[in-house]
Amino acid sequence: MSMRTLAFKALLFLVLCQAGQQGLASASEQREPPKKIAIVGAGIGGTSAAYFLRQEFGPSVKIDVYEAGTVGGRLATENIDGHDYETGGSLIHPLNLHMKHFVDRLGLSFRAGVPSKMAIFDGKGLMFEESDWFIVNFLRMLWHYGFNSLRMHMWVEGILDKVMRIYQYQQFGYSFSSVERLLHAMGGDEVLALLNQTLEEAMLAQGFSQAFINEIVTPISRSVALSCADSGLWAVDGGNKRVCSGLLYHSKAELIPARVTNIAIKTRPSKSGTIANFYEVNYVGDSGSAHSLYDIVVLATPLHQGLSDISFSGFSPSLPSHFPGAYHQIVTTLVLGRLNVSYLDARRNPSEFFVSDILMTENENLGIASLNFLDPVHITPGYSRPPASQPAVWKVYSTEPLTEEQLRMLFVSRERVVEKSWLACPSYRAPERQAPSFILHHNLYYLNPIEWAASSMEMSALSARNAALLASHRWHGDTSKVDQEDLHARLRGEL
Ligand SMILES: Cc1cc2nc3c(=O)[nH]c(=O)nc-3n(C[C@H](O)[C@H](O)[C@H](O)COP(=O)(O)OP(=O)(O)OC[C@H]3O[C@@H](n4cnc5c(N)ncnc54)[C@H](O)[C@@H]3O)c2cc1C
Ligand SMILES: *[C@@H]1O[C@H](CO)[C@@H](O)[C@H](O)[C@H]1NC(C)=O
Ligand SMILES: *[C@@H]1O[C@H](CO)[C@@H](O)[C@H](O)[C@H]1NC(C)=O
């Protein structure tokens, strides 16, 4: 698997800041607030949109959230042997400030941390095994790869610094109409250029050695690509999807369990004599098909084959049901069983094997990306991970379902196997095609183009906040907070 634009995708995942604060209310409040808003999709994107739209438009607007499957979307859990385990989006980085804010605001907590140990498997043996000692890891890296690892750290920090600016912009109420404009506002051409470069290209241009890229960066980014995200430290106690249900409740939105099939434009004369535009949302639920009219609609699901199937009528120019580009498959296989340690390292005694996260290099021939010890969504006091000689729940990421032969190679015994297949995130191909605008029509917004920059819970929340700001500014005819350039310099003056 290639590792397109991953530097950037991984970095964005690390993104931070406190957007919790109320966005500054728009100055021009002459127009009545909208009466009804529809959101399609109750994943983290749709539910955070409900939260931020409530913040922007106040208590009077009615917010309906349509969900065809289950609340949480790509955040989901599976019960094995009495405990729940994450099967979809799992890790939250401490710099993911929107997610952090939600967890605080909803009275949830982060799951207790369990120390983990990472190693890289190249098909023959374990190449780089982390020690419990940070300094040992650091010195080993330095010894092996010279200053590459230190430089990488600094390079990443430099980009991160810029990426983090988005929180400040949002706090001041600024919004962007497209992914490109949003990235450009963060770090100018330098950040924007990362969108259409492969990580390898970007790093070679920065003078990193090919060996370092092949041996360290590639395996990490492969697993990052497969999990859509960098490994982080946190997960929500009780399951990440609790954030979604919490946001729905907190925003006083109504959940409509139905599949949206069509969105049509309707016009109606208004009291003042002008013609008003409405969106008619057609949907199919348990009690048959129905429709409702809305002032504003937010689409919070990828509009791609296999992920949603919504037709649009009456729009000019017309809107497609599916945008170009595909989402790639990730298969999550949870196995309750005993790991075949001799497959990874013939000489190792399983009762002394405590590596919890094993990344596979491209040489590895089983066709799997990573193998991770999986902790339950709730960690009880006194919990500790057993050595590999005992049965435990392991999570295997692969692009295709695992065969019996693969499973037999990886595990010496299996008590339970649960497989979940996802169309997980966009198949990034550099150079990126242009992601669609966040604005599909006057008051019709689309969150998921953000995934073409990076696909993570935080990015969905960030896009939701952006769309809520956009919707509010545009509703009130205030263009001063949309697509502004040079914000970094200007805000420095304002602070
Ligand atoms: C295996 C895996 C591992 C991942 N790991 C991480 C991780 O560690 N950290 C991280 O931050 N991110 C991770 N991600 C990515 C993260 O899960 C997603 O980026 C995020 O959950 C996307 O949320 P969303 O709300 O934008 O979309 P979704 O969660 O896909 O929500 C869209 C919702 O819309 C609904 N819907 C679709 N069409 C219709 C319709 N017509 N009518 C009504 N409802 C409809 C769907 O049922 C779905 O519930 C991972 C993803 C996967 C699959
Ligand atoms: C990437 O995009 C930028 C600006 O959009 C452009 O100037 C640059 O040439 C592109 N780089 C590559 C490698 O395509
Ligand atoms: C475990 O791995 C070894 C070494 O690759 C392999 O020979 C064996 O078949 C695997 N499976 C079991 C059940 O031991």
Image (spheres, rainbow, N blue to C red):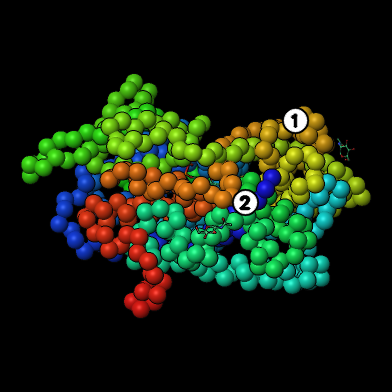
Q: Secondary structure at mark 2?
A: loop
Residue mark closest to the camera, 2 vs 1: 2
Disc sitting over residue 185 in the figure: none
How far separated are the C-alphas under marks 2 and 1?
Answer: 28 Å
- Residue 35 in percent (x, y) is at 21, 43
Residue 416 visible in the picture: yes
Dividing the picture into quadrants, the one containing residue 445 is top left
Nearest the viewer among 57 and 237 is: 57
- Which residue ends up furthest to the top in the rendered image? 288
The reply to whether dot 2 and dot 1 touch (C-beta < 8 Å) is no
Q: Residue at x 54, y 56 (%)?
A: 195
In the displayed structure, 463 sits above or below 171; it is: above
Q: Residues within 10 Å of mark 2 (few under 14, many from 20)?
A: many
Decide if ligand 2 comes within 8 Å of the CB at mark 2: no
Q: What residue is shown with label 1?
A: 403
- Residue 64 in percent (x, y) is at 31, 39
User: Which comes before the other along the chain, label 2 or label 1?
Assistant: 2
Q: Residue at x 80, y 31 (%)?
A: 405
Nearest the viewer among 250 and 427 is: 427
Q: Residue at x 49, y 38 (%)?
A: 324
> In the image, 487: left or right of 117?
left
> In the image, 162: left or right of 58?
right
- Residue 263 in percent (x, y) is at 32, 33
Query: Callout 1, which amino acid?
Result: Thr
Question: Image quadrant of ligand 3?
Answer: top right
Quadrant of the snapshot with the C terminus: bottom left
Q: What residue is shown with label 2?
A: 4
Residue 136 visible in the picture: no
> In the image, 482: left or right of 344?
left
Q: Residues within 10 Å of mark 1 (few under 14, many from 20)?
A: few
Query: Callout 2, which amino acid?
Result: Arg
